[in-house]
Amino acid sequence: MSTQAQKANIEFRPRTEPVHRSADERIFHLLALYPNISRAEEREILTFLKNARYLDIALLKADRTVKRQLDLFIGAHTRTLSFSAAEVIAIACMVIAFLAICWLLWQATMIGGA
């Protein structure tokens, strides 16, 4: 511990809880109340599910107290949670462009090596 911290009598402890824990608890609470929630609360859950890490969603699914409500929610909002046609096309274009670049590089090495 530094001398300034000792003078100020500050105790340093490592963080044991994730920073976003309160958001997870909020979503957990909203899912426990589902389907008796407002449209704004539904949007809050949708935003969380679209932006959350896969681990956070898996932890929600693993909890038996909200698993049923989460499955119902996802079933009712599959269209909103799925990829749009524009997103699929964009991803496909990126994959095709990557493969084209790889093929061009391969062709360049074949010409240079021959």
Image (cartoon, rainbow, N blue to C red):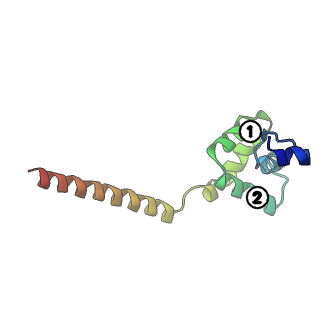
Crowd tier of the residue under label 1, counting other residues whose Cα lies within 10 Å: few below 14, some 14–19, many 20 or above = some
Q: Position of residue 27 (x, y in %)?
A: 79, 49
Q: Nearer the viewer, residue 111 or 90?
A: 111
- What residue is shown at x 87% (from left), y 41% (from top)? 11
Tag 1's secondary structure?
A: helix
Name the residue: 55% across, 58% down: 83
Mark 2 belongs to which amino acid?
Answer: Glu
**Depth-wise, is mark 2 or mark 1 nearer the camera?**
2
Residue 26 shown left or right of residue 98 in the figure: right
Q: Is residue 10 visible?
A: no
Coordinates of residue 22 in the picture (x, y in percent): 82, 49
Location of residue 50 in the rendering, given as x and y in whole percent from the top left corner: 64, 55
Residue at 14% across, 51% down = 110
Residue at mark 2: 44
Which is nearer the N-term, disc 2 or disc 1?
2
The CA span between labels 2 and 1 is: 18 Å
Position of residue 13 relative to residue 20, above or below, is above
Name the image quarter holding the N terminus: top right
Q: Which residue is mark 1?
A: 67
Figure check: 6 above or below 106: above
Query: Residue 112 versus residue 107: which sits nearer the camera?
Result: 112
